[in-house]
Image: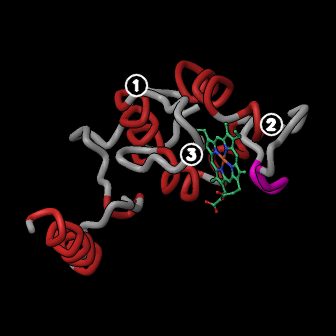
Amino acid sequence: MFYRFFPGVFLAFFLFVQLTGCGLWTKFEDYPCPNPDGKTKVTYTNFVKPFMTTYCDTCHSTNSMNRRGAPLAYIFDNYESVKTLKRRIFLRSAANNTTMPPGPDDPPETARMKLAEWIVCGTPK
Ligand code: HEC
């Protein structure tokens, strides 16, 4: 009995969360810089570049041998392109957003939090 009822409860909860706006997708407008001075020690050079190389650029770099369907407009192999695409990158991979990379080889949560912090605290180079 409980198990038949359970999916309905889950669905209701899911809809509630979606409708109240604290959804499963965090937008970067809804994620303030966690540091009081609005700055961060996370930089493109010390964190974001190696992060992109490890977790994204097998499919998203200009010279990827096998993009596996990653759109040509989404290239993350230099500072300018990552900065320009930060809104979409946030939605897919930062904070609690986990739809990129696809598959089980996901970056650890600490790395997603660092990526989020970099995006919302001024994307320093
Ligand atoms: C195994 C290959 C692969 C890896 C690794 C990968 N992606 Fe993707 N990416 C794709 C494919 C395929 C699409 C197009 C389908 C889709 O949008 O889900 C895509 C689309 C995207 C898009 C554009 C879609 C949109 O409008 O939101 C963004 C942004 C993105 N990926 C970010 C990332 C980030 C950031 C990483 C690393 C943390 C990453 N991806 C790692 C394959 C990959």
Q: Is mark 3 within 8 Å of ligand 1?
A: yes
Q: Secondary structure at mark 2?
A: loop
Q: Is residue 42 left or right of residue 62?
A: left
Q: Secondary structure at mark 3?
A: loop
Please tell me which of labels 3 and 2 falls first in the chain: 2
Tell me where the magenta segment starts and ends, as one range: 70-74
Q: Amino acid at mark 1?
A: Lys
In which quarter of the view is residue 13 placed?
bottom left
Look at mark 1 in the image and give the residue it sits on. Answer: 41
Q: Is residue 36 left or right of residue 65?
A: left
Please tell me which of labels 2 and 1 falls first in the chain: 1
From the image, state whether disc 3 or disc 2 is nearer to you: 3
Look at mark 3 in the image and give the residue it sits on. Answer: 100
Look at mark 2 in the image and give the residue it sits on. Answer: 61
Q: Which mark is residue 30?
A: none
Residue at the far left in the pictured view: 2
